[in-house]
Amino acid sequence: MPKYLLLIIVALPCLLAQPETGRPYIRNYLPDEYGATPQNWAITQDQLGVMYFGNTSGVLEYDGSTWRTIPLPNNHVVRSLASDDAGTIWVGGRDELGFLQADSSGRLGYVSLLGKLPADLGKIGDVWRTHYHNGRILYFSTLQLMIYTNEQLRVIKPQGSFMCL
């Protein structure tokens, strides 16, 4: 066997191998794996790298190995998420808005801000966008804009509706 043919046979697997450099690792998870419905509406990440997903079943928390569902009152859907500079996860859902807060054991739970809204406001609708900007949390529903700052919620009602931000 000629030495060039031997070199080609030995080197061929290396030449055909596709380098992994620069290719992101992508892993898809099925609903059976994360234990919730297949509809995910939003995603954010905290300062420690923990991922949070707005799901029809609530907020899904994923630390890289374990999935956990954090439900909203009345099992409402989570439509939007945002994280701020302090690492707080802010949540917007169907007729619901609030944030995640750790209990005495460090486990996150949902805290609703509905009690800070005017009593005569009625339903707030789906909160499709939640944003953090300059120390304020902005919750956009199709019915109104709600701005949370200094533990106060201010409501701005448009003449039409908020469809996009």
Image (cartoon, helix red, strand yellow):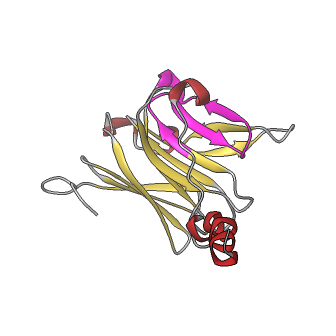
Whole-percent x, y for residue 37 in the image: 46, 26
Q: Is residue 65 magenta?
A: yes
Q: Residue at x 53, y 42 (%)?
A: 28
- Vertical order, 122 against 20 (above or below): above
| Residue nearest the viewer, comparing 96 with 56 | 56
Q: Residue at x 45, y 48 (%)?
A: 42
Q: Residue at x 70, y 58 (%)?
A: 49
Q: Is residue 159 magenta?
A: no
- Vertical order, 7 against 111 (above or below): below
Whole-percent x, y for residue 163 in the image: 21, 54
* Residue 138 image-quadrant placement: bottom left
Q: Residue at the front extreme?
A: 1
Q: Quadrant of the N terminus?
A: bottom right
Q: Quick check: 51 left or right of 153? A: right
- Vertical order, 111 against 86 (above or below): above
Whole-percent x, y for residue 165 in the image: 28, 64
Whole-percent x, y for residue 11 in the image: 66, 70
Residue range corresponding to the magenta coloring = 53-75
| Residue nearest the viewer, comparing 65 with 133 | 65
Q: Residue at the bottom extreme?
A: 4
| Residue nearest the viewer, comparing 91 with 1 | 1
Q: Residue at the right extreme?
A: 105
* Residue 159 image-quadrant placement: bottom left
The mark total stands at: 0
